[in-house]
Amino acid sequence: MRQVLIVASAEWCCWLRSRLAMVGALLMVGLLLATTALTAVRMHGEAAERAHHQAEAEAAFLAQPDRHPHRMVHYGHYVFRTPAPLALFDPGLDPVTGQSIFLEGHRQNTAMFASSGTSADLGGFSWLSPAMVYQLFGPLLVILLGHGLITRERETATLATLLAQGTPGRALLAGKALALLSFVVLLLMPLALSAGLAVQFSKHPAEHPLAAWALVGAYGLYLVIWSALTLLASVLLTRRAAVLATLVTLWIGLTLVLPAVAVSSAAQSAPMAGKLERDLAMFADLRKLGDSHNANDPAFAELRAGLLAKHGVQRVEELPVNLRGVVAQVGEQKLTQTLNTHAGAQRAAETRQAAALASFGWFTPLLAVADASRVLAATDLTHHHRFLQDAETLRYDFVQGLNQVHAEKLAYADDVRRSSDPQAERRTRVDSAHWQLLDRFRFEPDPAGKRIAQARPQWLMLGVWCAVLVGAVFWAGGRLKP
């Protein structure tokens, strides 16, 4: 163990004397600080703005005066998704998916208001986030510091001396690896600090420090993989120039080329229908349901006959409920079932494509850590889908609540004449207290334990990468020669 510590200490002394290594480390730290600060400012501003707009939307809905309940169905309501605390580190899909939905009767609107202003806000850093810095530039810094760990000893003819003095090859490699791993720990400290503070001061009750530590662990495994790869190349190749060229080529392939190939391959292996094609199919199904605004539509003839028979009356005016409100309820139920079927098919197609892309984590650790990062930060596709589903649940509940008011509080005769009779129109206005049926919308990320479990495939990929490369370094250490 003493030999391992001596080797590690000597390596650190060499790095501290190297201006290139220090400049590279300082640039990395500066980039992390800049992207973290800019992302934190943007995410804090977005969180405050969305919370403000959510409160305004709720107040505007609840402040509406007495009116016909179906008017409120079409008046609608906005819901906003505030950023999760760890989105400070990894915004994930949030900048490209909409974070607000307008909820109204008879429609499932798509999410909107993606962060189109991000580029102007962040300038040249618009595409960067702290997660992206770790994913792309962390390996480069490891390569910069570690590519000469063994080849430098060969080129200065000190490797033969060390081995001849009885230093085992594996002990020498262990010391070099300890030095590199200690640098990785230092590199992870900004992540641990920013993620810990984001969770500590979070107003999200579902957030937990465990998620921050899991995020640090995922990036730790990722940088260990690159450390092992760097050390292995330094052992197997004899010149630093060759090691550096090989590692940079691998970096280009694993972080730039393969992810782009994976995206194209996933799109081809799990194709999705275009929006126009999906909308045409959905509208064709909706037309079969009839018009719920027209109580005399043939599609609701059976419902009408059933209500008359159930209550033993001959005319709809004699029913104890408003037929038009009942038709609105049944029509919304059938329409929502159809909309949910199409929305579920779309989510399933997106999930299949995401799974096809994630499987490429076996070929490049960047995709594995990027997927794990988004899951742990609650900025992944699963959370986006849950936002859409939670918003739809709220939409359906408040629309059906208003339809129930329509059916139970308004007389059918007044409802029919309200467009031509001012007195009937006034009688069809219900008290605004009924608008209180709207539930408050607050989107919370999944619990930390659930997110860690959801990232299980990515943990496995990173673990296998790490085990294989560490095993290869151990094997190479036993055969280390001058």
Image (cartoon, rainbow, N blue to C red):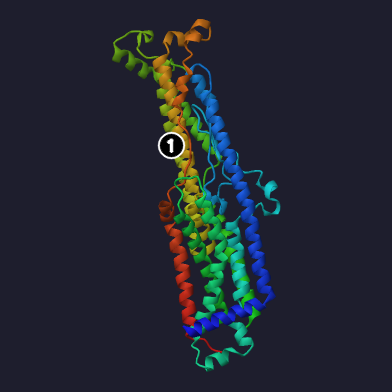
Q: Is residue 15 above or below residue 50?
A: below
The picture quadrant where one finds residue 111 is: top right
Q: Residue furthest front?
A: 201
Query: Residue 110 location in percent, x, y?
Result: 54, 37
Question: What residue is rendered at 48% in x and 68% in y?
Answer: 465
Query: Residue 369 location in percent, x, y?
Result: 51, 60
Q: In this orientation, which residue lies closer to the viewer: 35 or 337? A: 35
Query: Residue 385 location in percent, x, y?
Result: 48, 43
Question: What residue is rendered at 50% in x and 61% in y?
Answer: 216
Which quarter of the image is occupied by the C terminus?
Answer: bottom right
Total residue callouts = 1
The picture quadrant where one finds residue 263 is: bottom right
Q: In this view, does 18 lie above or below 403?
A: below
Query: Residue 430 location in percent, x, y?
Result: 46, 15
Q: Is mark 1 on a helix, strand or loop?
A: helix
Q: Which amino acid does label 1 sit on?
A: Thr
Please indicate, yes or no, whether residue 257 appears anywhere in the rendered image.
no
Question: What residue is rendered at 37% in x and 16% in y?
Answer: 304
Q: In this orientation, which residue lies closer to the viewer: 22 or 481? A: 22
Please indicate, yes or no, whether residue 85 appears anywhere in the rendered image.
yes
Say which residue label 1 marks: 341
Q: In this view, does 115 lie to the left or right of 458?
A: right
Mark 1 is surrounded, within 10 Å at the Cα level, by few (under 14), some (14 to 19) or many (20 or more) other residues, namely few
